[in-house]
Amino acid sequence: MQVMISDMTFEILAAGVGVIAGAIAAVSGFGIGSVLTPLFAAHYDTKLAVAIVSVPHLAGTAVRFARLRKHIDGRVLIRFGVLSAVGGLLGALLNAGADSPVLTIVFGLLLLFAGITSLFGLSERMRFGRKTAWVAGALSGIFGGMVGNQGGIRSAALLGFEIDKESFVATATAIALIGDGARMPVYAVAEHRAIAAAWIPIAFATAGALVGTLWGVRLLRRIPEEVFRRAVSMLVILLGFYMLMRGIR
């Protein structure tokens, strides 16, 4: 459902939501696509919204990567990164024909399960092995390319690894950057004219995401580990609930 508001109002709204999205992503490792995509989908076609949001997503992710790159866990990055990129490319190719409510509902349920088990400590009994990590990387990339919500399932899987909060966010950021590099050329070819026509709200959203990212990275260092993991779990649950309701509607 598209909402009709003035261009200036939407541009200011895009900047404000971009700040919030950038800050959330800087603290949790995901959030720019998850927060901005619903906003742009209310103003543009959903498929175009996914392509548009990939621009501020790339900008915020690149800045976050530059600030946190020394904390990257290379072992986890290799396990996730390769198939995340392949999945992102596949998801972007499927984007033109994929808007399945069933897929969205399944995605929402998976996120709810992952978030709830982590929040209540059940995930501490589960650790992701090599095969499971590769599958999770592929799924996160596919969902990112198709519906613009890669971060939730990636962070849900990363919660199963024993890495500190800086490594968590840095590694998630590096994986997201790889995924962006795989899927954005597809969007550029398929939607380049529509993306170019929306350059003003894209610029506002990108500026907001950058401001939020820079502020959020500073905030990350002040958050205790236990509070961080619970906050990420809650964000995963909220995203899962949103996706579930979106699919049902």
Image: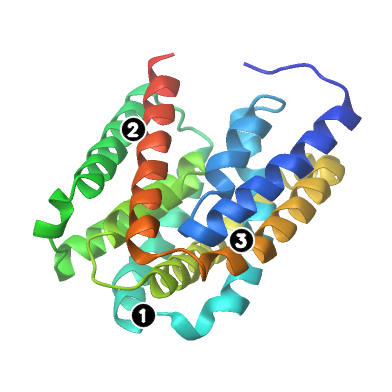
Q: How is the image coloured?
A: rainbow
Q: Could you tell me which secondary element the residue under label 1 belongs to?
A: loop
Name the amino acid type tagged 1: Asp
Q: What's the mark number on residue 231?
A: none
Say above or below: 77 vs 127.
below
- In this figure, which residue is indicated by the disc labeled 3? 216
- Residue at figure coordinates x 70%, y 28% from the top left: 44
Name the amino acid type tagged 2: Gly
Within 10 Å of disc 1 (Cα), the crowding (few <14, some 14-19, many 20+) is some
**Placement of the N terminus among the 4 image quadrants:** top right
Q: What's the mark number on residue 73?
A: 1
Q: CA distance from mark 2 to mark 1?
A: 28 Å
Q: Could you tell me which secondary element the residue under label 3 belongs to?
A: helix
- In this figure, which residue is indicated by the disc labeled 2? 108
In the rendered structure, which disc, 2 or 3, sits on the residue that comes first in sequence? Answer: 2
Say above or below: 113 vs 76.
above
